[in-house]
Structure formats: C-alpha cells, structure tokens
Image (cartoon, rainbow, N blue to C red):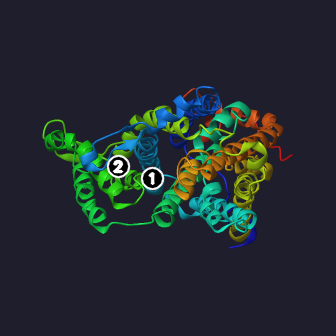
Amino acid sequence: MTGSTRRQYHLLTRGSWAEARRISRILRKETIGGALLLLSALLALAWANSPWSDTYHSVGAHVIGPQALHLDLSLTAWAADGLLAIFFFVAGLELKRELVAGDLRDPARAALPVAAALGGVIVPAGFYLLVAAGSDENAVRGWAVPTATDIAFALAVLAVVGSRLPSALRTFLLTLAVVDDLLAIAIIALFYTDDLAMLPASAALLPLIAFRILIRRCPGPGFRIAGPLLVPLALITWALVHASGLHATVAGVLLAFCVPVHRPCADENTGACSQDCEEGTAERLEHRLRPLSAGFAVPVFAFLAAGVDLTGAGGLTQVLTDPTVLGIVVGLVLGKPIGIMAAAWLVARFTRATLDDELAWIDVLGVALLGGVGFTVSLLIGELAFGAGTVRSDRVTVAVLLGSVLAAVLAGIVLRRRHHVHERLQEYESLDLDHDGVPDVYGTPSPTAGEEPSDRS
C-alpha cells in the first residue's frame, strides 16, 4: 500500500450522533452540578472565616449513625465515605459504558485519553515530589493530591469561557475525566489503605456477587421480586468495604462494574429475554443517579470539606510558602497540562495520527489546562494523606482551591482565544439542511452544506 492511499488516523474525532447527544446530556448535568459545587465551596469558606465559624465546624463534627455497627461517623466523614461512594458509582457506570460501548472499546480511540490520563497523573505527581518532598517525610504522602481532575468544576468553567467547544474536544475531556476517576480510585485503594482487614473485605464479596447476579437478571417477573434487594445488598457491600479499611468509595466502583451495559429486553407476554434494549441498565442507572451525584452528593461534600479557617491554617503568608501547598499548585497548574500535552504528542508521534483539520494543538492545550481543575477527589486524597481537620489538611484545601482557580483562569484565556473558531465549528456541527433531526456532519454530507471550517491559528 502506498503512502498516498494509507489510512489517515485522527487523534480527536466527533464520533456518532448518538454518542454526541449522550455526552451533551451528561455535560449539561455536570455543568449545573459544577455551579452548585462552586457555590457550596464559597459558602463554606465564607462561613468558616466568619464570626460564626464555630457553628460551621460543629455541624461537620456532628456524629450520627449506629454505634453497634461502628458507623457512628461525623457528617464530614459521612460525606467523604458515603456521598462520594455515589459519585464513584456514577463514575464507574460511565467508565464501564465507555469500555463496553464507548470510545475506550476501540484501542485506537482509547489510546489518547488513556495516555493523557496517565500523563496527567505521573507528571503532576513528579512535580509535587520535586517541590515538596524535601520539606519533611510526611509531605510525601500528598503526592497524589494534584493528580485528580474534577469534571464538574471543569465544566462549570467551560460553561463560562468555552461553551462552544467542538464535539471532539468535549468527548476527549469527558473520556479523559472518566479514566482519571478510575486512576484516582486505584490510587486511593493501593496507596491510602493503611490497615486492611481481610475478614470484612472477603465478606464484602458475598453481597457484591449477589448484587451482580440479581441486576443481570432479565427484567421479567423474577426481577420484580429480586429488584428491591439491590439497594440493601449495595449498602451491605459498602458497610463491609468501609469496615475492611479500604476507603468506602471503592465499593461504589465495584458495584458499578457489576451493572451490565446492555440489558436484555423481556417479552411482554412470556417474560422471556429477547434482544438487547437500546438503553442498557448502566445507562439507565447513570441517567437517574447523576443528578443526585452532581446536584447533592458532591456539593454537600464540598461544603463540608472546603471550609478552611485561614487563620487556623497559619495565615496566607505561611500557607503560600508551605512546600506542600506550592507542590500542589505547581502540580495542578503546570504538571497536569504538561503531562496531558506530552502524552497526546507522544500518541501522535508514534501512531502517526494527526489532529482533525479544524482543530489545533492550542485547543488540546485548553482542555489540558482544564485537567488541572481539581477539587472533589483532590480534597478527599488530601484528607486521607494528612488527616481531616489537621493544619496540613487545611493548607491542602487552600492549595487545591488556588491551583484550580489558576488553572481555570489559564484555560479560559486559551479557550477564549479560539472562541470564534469554536463557534463556527459548533454551527457547522449543528447544521441540518435535510431536516431529518440529525446534523448533516453525522450523516451523509449535504452538497450545499459548504466547506467545513478550518482555522489552525
């Protein structure tokens, strides 16, 4: 085969119309959740630094739950261990769908987001260790804080500065965040589990297996009986994982991986399973639980975790000169985009793939900078690394907020520079001259649609 006829691979593609619609629905919900997250964080900061700060801290320290089951936890702990389990359950559902029916199913298309996510973990961790590791031994435990991306926070920024982002870039950002969430839960399980109790960890397999068997049953008469057992089984699995010493959010991902992506449909007359439903169980659950995750679980966690008393943290001068704080800020603002960009360039270099004609590397840089917007998982890792309520944990919170804001500002500057190009691309991707409900770019191109816009400035 000659070079002129060799198939040209593209790093970023807009995918199918069905996938584009699904991603648009997800991004709309996460954008609203991101706005609520920001409001919750600002309210927490204002309250924690007001004359009524004692009231704020007493709310987070209030203990509820059955003591007999060792679940008498503070509200802050319930938010981190319980509400974030919902967040990771939804993230796990999205990840499994991507692996089975989405971009991650195709190795060629998965190479970029997987490599970018790995680069976005390795490089910021390295930057953190270079800056902070020499300060003291305990500082090393925070290496994973700047490795996480908060998709809700990033999309809230995107809604303000880059709402016209082309479909290919939005798909890349979401897929990158999905892989990033998987790496985050793996880091939590492997590096932030100090004492693992094997008995409850092994016992958690029993309700987990039962959950998998029941949720995979055909939705016929038998499922109507077994279905109500799913929530109790999920709660038992969560409680046993919590008791094992693993962070309880791990249970969310394990349960999500048990949910089938394609659900077989039941015949209305016989109850027998027939063809796969167009919308599988994973997508149905994700559709129902994402508003709960983005609209309640994450904002409540942000409210209880972001309330840092700046005077208690040592004042801004001491905070901003703390090597741990500097390491986190450098990791988020520089490490994340450098890692993502370097990985993308290496994928392009070794696969001989190119960007789509209408996109430029500065567009990838804008998305890479959004990857440095870390919040939810970064705060969680900070608490696991240094303990909730400690001075260093409070400084980590300030560092995550500062680094995320700086990354958001830089992403806004880059994306605004390309706003006119993105606006033309979105108009092109929305064009439906044959009025069939599907934009022409996803189907047979219309002969009068004109040339696809191209601007690599």
Q: Do the CB atoms of the residues marked 1 and 2 lie less than 8 Å apart?
A: yes
Residue marked by disc 1: 101
Give the quarter of the image for residue 354.
bottom right
Q: Going from the N terminus, do you reach mark 1 or mark 2 first? A: 1
Disc ID at residue 262:
2
Q: Residue at x 65, y 46 (%)?
A: 168
Question: Residue 246: x percent and y percent?
Answer: 40, 60
Label 1 residue SS? helix
Q: Considering depth in this image, is 421 or 6 the residue closer to the camera? A: 421
Residue 364 seen in render? yes
Q: Amino acid at mark 2?
A: His
Q: Residues within 10 Å of mark 1 (few under 14, many from 20)?
A: some
Q: Amino acid at mark 1?
A: Ala
Q: Residue at x 69, y 33 (%)?
A: 163
Q: Where is 115 relative to 47, above or below?
A: below
Question: Residue 311: x percent and y percent?
Answer: 69, 39
Left or right: 217 with respect to 128?
A: left
